Amino acid sequence: MAFGRKKVEPEVVVDPDRVAGDDLENFEDDLDEEDRALEDAELLAELARQEREERLATLARPEGPWDLADAPETETPRLDLGALQVVVLPDTDVRLEVSPEGEVVAATLVRGESALQLNVFAAPRTEGIWAEVRAEIRDALNGGGGQADEADGAFGTELRAKVPTEVPGQGIVLSPARFVGVDGPRWFLRGLLTGPAATEDAVAQPLLAAMKEVVVVRGADPMAVRDPLPLALPADAVQQAEEQAAGLQMPERGPEITETR
């Protein structure tokens, strides 16, 4: 998302109560034109940065998704997945997608035949990236045999798309999909609706309601823009996996009893 800059003339403020008259008369500006231009450019850049931060802070997220710093309490506990905290609504399952390296890369909310895949990424401090990402997805689909158009949605501008998908026995078919995105402070949350929720607003509503309740835990570590924020298995799932692994270990060989007849 691009932000315009306002031309601001640098202003020097002098407190007459703290500066003596002789000091004012004897003041000399010892900067040459090159240094003065550099100082003015740095001041304008700082003012522009502050303006972008202020505008990013006012991005419309009055009903979520939330940053950890402003997340409200809910009656329904949130499932802790590391960088994402997700409320599990009735009749909704949470499935985690794991890479071949064993890293959790996405969380998917499944409700009936519909699904909402959630991915969260690092973003700049001073501006959002959804407009840029949205344009890239749109151009890639329109240029690769699919279709994508912008539309107004629950979180602002989104993409209504048809994605080329290989279906066994049918070849390549165009499957409906709906991309939604939310810019937050130093993070970007992307949702992908598939199944009936991609085309039916009434079916999508419970999944979008769950997305509004998501809390993003950005953390303080510096990260490259668009790098995925680290997700993790819930603590109880890790414990269960460890217990199952322990149960599959071969028992140590103990004393043997030989029966002699």
Image (cartoon, grey):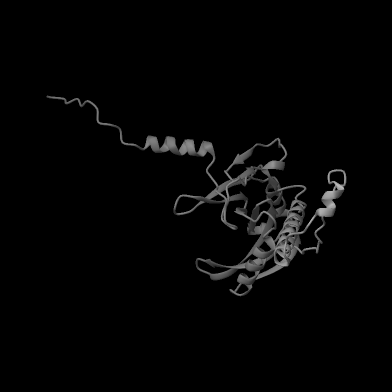
Task: List x then y, in percent, for residue 222.
Answer: 58, 50
Q: Is residue 115 left or right of residue 42?
A: left
- For the image, the number of numbered tags is 0
Q: Tell me if residue 192 comes above or below residue 168 in the rendering.
A: above
Which quadrant would residue 256 be assigned to in this image? top left
Q: Tell me if residue 4 comes above or below residue 88 in the rendering.
A: below
Residue drawn at point x = 85 percent, y = 46 percent:
20
Residue drawn at point x = 72 percent, y = 42 percent:
70
Task: List x then y, in percent, for residue 79.
Answer: 60, 40
Task: List x then y, in percent, for residue 139.
Answer: 64, 71
Q: Give the quarter of the figure containing the C terminus.
A: top left
Q: Tell me if residue 2 comes above or below residue 98 in the rendering.
A: below
- Toward the left, the furthest residue is 261
Task: List x then y, in percent, for residue 92.
Answer: 63, 45
Q: Tell me if residue 261 comes above or below residue 29 in the rendering.
A: above
Which quadrant would residue 125 be assigned to in this image? bottom right
Residue drawn at point x = 60 percent, y = 57 percent:
225
Q: Nearer the viewer, residue 175 or 225?
A: 225
